[in-house]
Amino acid sequence: MTELDEIFGESNRPVSFEDIQSLRYMEQVIQETWRLFPPIPMIAKKPTTDIQLENCVLPEGSTIAIIIMAMHRNPTQFPNPDVFNPDNFLPERIKARHPYSFIPFSAGSRTCIGAKYAMLLVKVMLATLLRSYRVYSKRRERDFVLAGQTVLKRREGFLINLKPREKSSMIIAAA
């Protein structure tokens, strides 16, 4: 909330594009959430040529499954990989990692065209919601049961509670 308070103070004005660009810590929180619970748990690729690895060859046209959730929990890229830590996305830590160690929306020429829009949309939604409400869940993360489909989700949904903040009145997001 500190970052939101610094940007908005007591104002209930709509969220602007400039505000969204200033929400750097919120972006780290979103990225860390996507690291632990990627929107797409797995992607498949087909090499257009044979790929020589250390001990084998991946033949042209074969299907290669990339388990994004496992990749994002690689301890050589993310120390304490099962711990939620937004500092994993500080600029210096991003530079120190392999560029493809974090791929919540795939990577390279096949990156999801909606990835930047998703970040923008989540930031607007969170900035609007968190300025008006405290959000909490009575369920613990260790009790989550995930359902790996096209999009990763909790099998039983995600029930949250909203409690109005005392200082805020209704905030409307800019369209």
Image: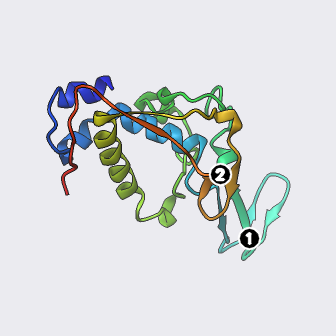
Nearer the observer: mark 1 or 2; the answer is: 2
Of residues 97 and 5, which is closer to you in this image? 5
Tell whether label 2 touches label 1 (CB within 8 Å). Answer: no
Quadrant where the N terminus is found in the figure = top left
151 vs 115, left or right, is right
Graded by Cα atoms within 10 Å as few (under 14), some (14 to 19) or many (20 or more), the crowding at tag 1 reads few
- In the rendering, which numbered label is found on residue 63? 1
Residue 134 in which image quadrant: top left
Among numbered discs 1 and 2, the one appearing first in the sequence: 1
Graded by Cα atoms within 10 Å as few (under 14), some (14 to 19) or many (20 or more), the crowding at tag 2 reads few
Residue 84 in which image quadrant: top right
- In the rendering, which numbered label is found on residue 89? none
125 vs 167, left or right, is right
Q: CA distance from mark 1 to mark 2?
A: 31 Å
Residue at the spot of label 2: 156
Of residues 79 and 54, which is closer to you in this image? 79
Say which element carries label 2.
Answer: loop
Residue 156 place in picture, x, y as percent: 65, 51
Residue type, label 1: Thr
All told, the count of numbered labels is 2
Residue type, label 2: Glu
